[in-house]
């Protein structure tokens, strides 16, 4: 999709046919997002316009199965789309991360009627938000949100935080516990009675993700909108590593944006840094050496992201334990490395460019702030421990999902999504 064509997507809904169209559309959208990324970071608007354009571009429906009229692109395409969008604006690039994960949950957990409902919604431009995490719980698997049967449907009650994208969603998938103590996903309409999404996200980075609070007060949920998510954890699958790698793609995209800004500013400067033995910043061999090292590290990181995404595709289609373990190891390592390389680039920007880089109007600090806020989503040091456990002992990262599901069933806790 060309940038001129993007002007039309606010009034026309696109259905993208393949991976090539998805990548081209993401590139055009990233260019458009970049234009106002500094202003969005400064003013913190709710990104209604941006997410509407994202939905109408057709990108949010690219993983709908072919049998339901979608392009059914591989996960590697989705990872690249998230990376590209994040080069334009890391906060907006993060918004579809949960969306794509919950589309996959419909494919994995939904019955025929549920798939027809939600895949049809996606092809009409619907956006999925997110309501999983809870404050004050003992762990990520300790959920207090409950789904209680009532008549032919259910009632949902609970409070969630880190609800990325919920404020601009059409549907909010909510992780809850049913009467049998199993984890389910209740897909709730954003404007349903009893749903309140608060604009209380106050982090110093990723400002327009609005990953704040969502409250569900006795919300009526028809049975067709409830997925038995616990079934996913009874079989080998790559669902969790897929989510991890999508998060890594956000960090890699922000790192690329920070590096490109650094290079552009170095090229534009004629005055050398104070004390540098060079005629200009462009001729400063120390700057060249540092940029050369960072460029190499970033290229390696981007290659690792693509390699991990290809491994996920293989794991997804094979379903074999070995391929899933290898893909998970690559995904976890990529996420950990993305934090290190990304923060190094976003920090090096300032001494490489000099005092001019601190001008607030340039908004260059947003790259570091966005990376710092988003990268703490995972305990990345522990990702390296899991990778090392695989390297030394051949043990798959974490407990096998089926074993985890059995343990959880034994003690009544929920399984993480």
Image (cartoon, helix red, strand yellow):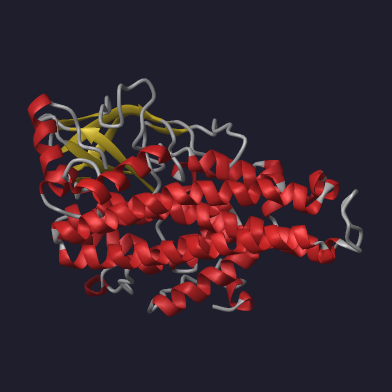
Q: Quadrant of residue 132?
A: top left
Which image quadrant: the C terminus? top left
Where is residue 407 drawn, in percent x and y? Answer: 11, 32
Q: Is residue 71 above or below residue 83?
A: below
Which image quadrant: the N terminus? bottom right
Report the side of 239 relative to 277 (left or right).
left
Report the side of 22 relative to 282 (left or right).
left
Of 187 and 28, nearer the camera is 28
Of 394 and 118, nearer the camera is 394
Of 211 and 196, nearer the camera is 211
Residue drawn at 32 percent across, 22 percent down: 137
Q: Is residue 161 above or below residue 16?
A: above
Where is residue 401 drawn, in percent x and y? Answer: 16, 44
Residue drawn at 46 percent across, 57 percent down: 249
Where is residue 47 drawn, in percent x and y? Answer: 58, 49
Can the viewer see residue 152? no
């Amino acid at each position: 999709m060309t940038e001129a064509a993007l002007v039309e997507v606010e009034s026309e809904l696109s259905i993208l046919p393949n991976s090539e169209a998805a990548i081209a559309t993401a590139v055009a959208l990233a260019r458009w997002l970049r234009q106002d990324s500094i202003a969005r970071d400064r003013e913190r608007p709710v990104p209604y316009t941006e997410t509407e354009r994202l939905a109408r571009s057709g990108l949010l429906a690219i993983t709908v199965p072919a049998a339901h009229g979608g392009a059914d692109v591989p996960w590697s395409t989705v990872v690249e789309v998230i990376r590209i969008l994040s080069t334009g604006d890391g906060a907006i690039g993060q918004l579809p991360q949960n969306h794509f994960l919950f589309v996959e949950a419909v494919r994995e957990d939904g019955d025929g009627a549920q798939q027809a409902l939600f895949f049809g919604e996606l092809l009409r431009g619907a956006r999925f938000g997110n309501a999983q995490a809870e404050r004050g719980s003992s762990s990520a698997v300790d959920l207090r949100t409950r789904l209680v049967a009532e008549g032919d449907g259910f009632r949902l009650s609970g409070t969630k935080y880190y609800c990325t994208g919920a404020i601009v969603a059409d549907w909010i998938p909510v992780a809850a516990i049913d009467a049998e103590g199993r984890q389910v996903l209740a897909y709730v309409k954003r404007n349903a009675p009893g749903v309140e999404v608060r604009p209380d996200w106050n982090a110093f980075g990723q400002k327009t993700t609005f990953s704040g609070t969502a409250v569900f007060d006795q919300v009526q949920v028809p049975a067709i909108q409830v997925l038995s998510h616990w079934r996913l954890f009874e079989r080998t699958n790559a669902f969790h590593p897929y989510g991890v790698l999508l998060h890594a793609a956000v960090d890699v995209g922000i790192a690329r944006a920070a590096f490109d800004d650094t290079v552009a500013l170095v090229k534009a400067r004629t005055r050398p840094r104070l004390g540098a033995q060079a005629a200009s910043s462009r001729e400063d061999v120390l700057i060249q050496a540092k940029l050369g090292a960072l460029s190499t590290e970033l290229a390696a990181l981007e290659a690792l992201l693509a390699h991990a995404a290809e491994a996920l595709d293989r794991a997804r289609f094979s379903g074999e334990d070995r391929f899933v373990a290898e893909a998970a190891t690559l995904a976890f390592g990529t996420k950990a490395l993305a934090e290190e390389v990304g923060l190094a680039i976003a920090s090096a920007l300032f001494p490489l460019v000099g005092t001019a880089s601190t001008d607030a109007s340039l908004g260059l600090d947003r790259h570091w702030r966005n990376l710092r806020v988003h990268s703490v989503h995972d305990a990345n040091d522990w990702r390296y421990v899991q990778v090392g456990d695989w390297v030394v002992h051949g043990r798959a990262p974490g407990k096998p999902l089926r074993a985890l599901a059995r343990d959880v069933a034994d003690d009544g806790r929920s399984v993480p999504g």
